[in-house]
């Protein structure tokens, strides 16, 4: 068994008086693609935001390579190798594509290799090279998603978390996004993928967790989950 | 025609000062979403620091620029770290920050009344009354110097915001702070730095203004309002937008002298503000936040 890269134990979190997470537990081993599934408002995005430190949890534990993250400020987590491609891209719309990518390499260690990594991102996404001088806000949805993934890659993550990268994209682009996820995984990046597109996510992932109203209801290998009658009826309409 | 040219030149020279002070206000609002009502207080403080250095130590006001900029920068950071940071973020904190910073302004103003009385002061140097002759126009040396320093400041600031990593991070925080945290930017540090820079610009504007005009502890309130007009007109954070808006305000003010009695020229800025808010609420160039 591989070492756990990310381990979330009994995570609970509230926005003001509204509790959103009720004891979420999951683990992602080094070199895995794991997917976190569930319907709108189930708590997937919140779980990722807690892992990246944007939202402090109310209770529970988050371990990265065995080290507790709870005392680590959010802005120090990129340096540790954690990157999040947020839902809705969240680019800096009035900075150029190039500036967006370069700022992705803000941490000291990443800055030193910024030029080489920019070249890598441009090779992965030739469209971004073409549009490097354009404002990020003027890109199409698919290009913005590439830019957001590219920005995350600039920090040289060991764990890449993607929050609904296929949301709002045309079917052909959705396939592209999942191809990219596979490519990045082959390059050695561990991936935690949040998706509503259950079928696609389970095709690419090795294991999955299904989260419902703030806690994990099901987990298992992708094949098991795909075969689960409850999932087939609730999420796939089969 | 001669008179016309004179007024245009006067307006252009004044616009430099206006742009400097407005940029400070716009930068802080653009990045922190906080209206720095203490802007006028810092403008006044900058004037008095320059005046003190000149009266007590005989330091030329232009040589005291680094001191004034440094002191107001540190003062800005102290106000941010000590006060503003503890307010709730976003719309919930908007009213509190207005009250808080207005309070700081009152404290500064009254401290100045205690220390310096309410008498008008001026910084008088040997070149205060000297003027340059060019193209048949006589232009005050001081006004040219203030314009030059203001333009230089804005150019340096523009280069800082567009060419350096930290400058780009400031613009990025204005556009999406969470994404900055995700790539490793310490957003609190950027807020603090931005508040310092915005405040330093106010201090500098105060010092530059003091070498042109007389001032007392209430100095700066008119400038705060002029800064508002320019920010609304020119949008947030664009150096070009701010410069154009500052020029428009200066032109309108200067030419108002021809048509209006002197006691009404101060109101011209507000008329302009109302007109802009009614006709083009997004400003002349749209609301581009530090683009």
Image: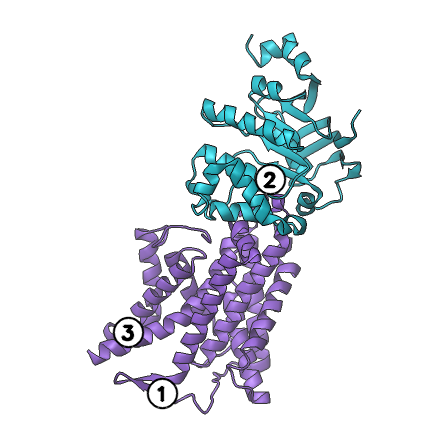
Chain colours: A cyan, B purple
Badges 2 and 3: C-beta atoms under 8 Å apart? no
Say which residue appears at 38% left-offset and 64% top-offset. Answer: B243
Mark in front: 1 vs 2: 2
**Residue matched to label 1:** B131
- State the quadrant of the N terminus of chain A: top right
Q: Position of residue A189 (x, y in %)?
A: 66, 33
Disc 1 to disc 2, C-alpha distance: 59 Å
Disc 1 to disc 3, C-alpha distance: 17 Å
Towards the viewer: B62 or A111: A111
Quadrant of the rendered image containing residue A24: top right
Question: Is residue B284 in sight in this rendering?
Answer: yes
Towards the viewer: A203 or B156: A203
Chain letter of the residue carrying label 1:
B
Chain letter of the residue carrying label 2:
A
**Residue matched to label 2:** A153
**Residue matched to label 3:** B8
Badges 1 and 2: C-beta atoms under 8 Å apart? no
Q: Is residue A33 above or below residue A151?
A: above
């Amino acid at each position: 068994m591989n070492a756990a890269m990310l381990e979330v134990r009994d995570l609970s979190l509230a926005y003001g008086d509204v509790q959103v997470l009720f004891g979420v537990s999951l683990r992602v081993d080094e070199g895995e693609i794991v997917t976190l599934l569930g319907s709108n408002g189930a708590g997937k995005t919140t779980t990722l935001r807690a892992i990246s430190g944007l939202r402090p949890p109310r209770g529970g534990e988050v371990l990265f390579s065995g080290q507790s993250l709870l005392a680590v400020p959010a802005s120090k987590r990129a340096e540790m190798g954690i990157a999040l491609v947020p839902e809705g891209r969240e680019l800096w719309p009035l900075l150029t594509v190039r500036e967006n990518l370069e700022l992705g390499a803000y941490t000291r260690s990443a800055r030193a290799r910024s030029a080489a990594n920019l070249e890598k991102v441009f090779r992965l996404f030739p469209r971004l090279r073409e549009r490097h001088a354009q404002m990020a806000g003027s890109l199409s949805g698919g290009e913005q998603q590439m830019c957001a993934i590219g920005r995350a890659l600039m920090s040289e993550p060991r764990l890449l978390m993607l929050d609904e990268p296929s949301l709002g994209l045309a079917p052909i682009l959705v396939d592209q996004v999942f191809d990219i996820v596979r490519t990045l995984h082959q390059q050695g990046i561990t991936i935690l993928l949040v998706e509503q597109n259950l079928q696609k996510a389970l095709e690419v992932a090795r294991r999955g967790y299904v989260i419902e109203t703030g806690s994990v209801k099901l987990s298992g290998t992708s094949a098991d989950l795909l075969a689960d009658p409850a999932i087939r009826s609730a999420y796939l309409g089969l | 025609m001669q008179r016309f040219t004179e007024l245009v030149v006067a307006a252009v020279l004044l616009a430099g000062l206006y742009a400097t002070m407005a940029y400070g206000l716009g930068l802080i609002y653009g990045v922190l979403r906080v209206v720095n009502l203490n802007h006028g207080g810092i403008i006044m403080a900058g004037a008095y620091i320059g005046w003190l250095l000149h009266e007590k130590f005989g330091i030329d006001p232009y040589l005291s620029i680094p001191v004034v900029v440094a002191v107001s920068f540190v003062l800005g950071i102290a106000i941010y770290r000590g006060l503003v940071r503890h307010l709730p973020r976003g719309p919930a904190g908007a009213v509190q920050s207005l009250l808080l910073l207005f309070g700081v302004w009152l404290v500064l103003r009254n401290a100045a009344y205690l220390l310096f009385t309410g008498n008008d002061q001026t910084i008088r140097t040997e070149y205060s009354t000297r003027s340059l002759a060019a193209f048949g126009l006589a232009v005050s040396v001081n006004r040219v110097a203030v314009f030059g320093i203001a333009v230089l400041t804005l150019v340096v600031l523009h280069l800082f915001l567009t060419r350096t990593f930290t400058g780009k991070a400031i613009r990025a925080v204005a556009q999406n702070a969470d994404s900055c945290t995700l790539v490793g930017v310490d957003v609190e540090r950027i807020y603090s730095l931005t508040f310092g820079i915005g405040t330093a610009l106010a201090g500098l504007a105060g010092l530059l203004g003091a070498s042109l005009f007389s001032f007392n502890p209430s100095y700066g309130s008119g400038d705060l309002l002029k800064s508002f007009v320019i920010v609304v007109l020119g949008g947030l954070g664009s150096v070009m937008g701010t410069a154009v808006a500052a020029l428009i305000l200066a032109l309108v003010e200067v030419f108002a002298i021809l048509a209006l009695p002197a006691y009404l020229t101060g109101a011209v800025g507000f008329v302009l503000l109302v007109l802009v808010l009614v006709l083009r609420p997004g400003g002349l160039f749209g609301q581009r936040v530090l683009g």
